[in-house]
Image (cartoon, grey):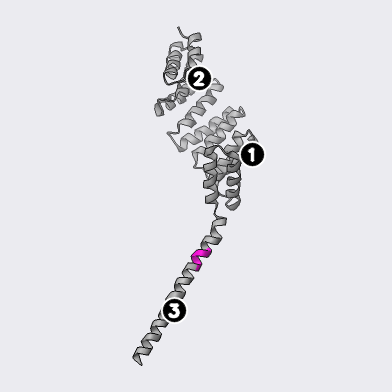
Amino acid sequence: MVQNIFIMSFKRLSKNIFLLFFTSILIQYNSVLFSQPNDSTLNYKNGVVKFNEGNFEVAELEFKKAIELNPKNSYALFYLAEIYSIANENQKAMENYSKAIELDSLNPKSFKGRGKLKAKMEDYHGSIDDFTKAIALDKNFADAYFNRGLSLLNLKEYKLSIEDFSKVVKLNPKDYQAYVQRGTAKFQLNDNKGACKDWSKAGELGYFKIYETIKKNCN
C-alpha cells in the first residue's frame, strides 16, 4: 500500500516536473519567436556593418527598419544622417541629425556630423556652434577641433583657428592635415617661417603634395 502511494506520488511529481519543463521551453521559444522581429538592435548592427563596408544602400534599409521598430534609436538616426550627408541629400541629413540630437543630446558625434553638414552648406557660424557643443561633451574630440578650425579659417579668424589646429596636433601629432591648415592660417598672418615649418612637418608625415606649396612660398 505504502509502496503504491509512493509510486503514484513519484509519477505525479515526474509529470509536474515535465509539464513545468515543457512550459519553460515553450515560453522561451515564444519569446524568441515574437521578440526578435521587433528588436531594432539586429537591424542597427547589420546597418553599421554595411556602413563600414561602404554598402550605403543596404545600410540605409537596415537603419530605416531599426527606426521603424524603435523610433527612439538615436544611433540609427545618426548613421542615416551620415548616409544622406554622403549622398548630398542635405535636407534629409539635417533632419536626421537634429532628430538624433533631440533624442540624445549627449552624443558628440551627432553635433560634429551636423556641424560638418552646416559647414558644407557654408553656414560657418552654425557649424562652429555645433562643433563647440561636441567639444564640450568630449574635450579630446580631435575631429571636432579640426573641423571647427576649418570653419574659423573660412571666417578669417586665423588666430582662433590656429588654436584649434594646435589642439589637434597635441592630441594626434601625426595628423598632417592639421599641420597643413595651421600653416595656412599662419601664412595668412604673415608668419611665413611658422607656416613653412608646419608645411614641412606635413611633408615629413607623408603629405608630399605640400612640397609644391613650400616651393612657391618658402625660401
Q: Going from the N terminus, do you reach mark 2 or mark 3 first? A: 3
Q: Nearer the viewer, mark 2 or mark 3?
A: 3
Q: CA distance from mark 2 to mark 3?
A: 82 Å
Q: Residue at x 55, y 49 (%)?
A: 43
Q: Residues within 10 Å of mark 3 (few under 14, many from 20)?
A: few
Q: Residues within 10 Å of mark 1 (few under 14, many from 20)?
A: some
* Number of numbered markers: 3
Q: Going from the N terminus, do you reach mark 1 or mark 3 first? A: 3
Position of 81 relative to 202 (above/below): below
Q: Residue at x 60, y 29 (%)?
A: 120
Q: Which residue is mark 3?
A: 15
Position of 121 relative to 190 (above/below): below
Q: Residue at x 45, y 33 (%)?
A: 141
Q: Kindly give the residue lying farthest to the bottom in the view shown.
A: 1
Report the disc number at residue 156.
Answer: none
**Which range is magenta?**
26-30
Q: Which residue is mark 1?
A: 92
Amino acid type, callout 2: Tyr
Whether residue 150 appears in magenta in the rendering, the answer is no
Q: Which residue is mark 2?
A: 158
Closest to the observer: 50 or 177? 50
Position of 196 relative to 157 (above/below): above
Q: Nearer the viewer, mark 1 or mark 3?
A: 3
Q: CA distance from mark 1 to mark 3?
A: 60 Å
Closest to the observer: 202 or 142? 202
Residue 126 drawn at (x, y percent) = 58, 31
Amino acid type, callout 3: Lys
Residue 49 drawn at (x, y percent) = 52, 42
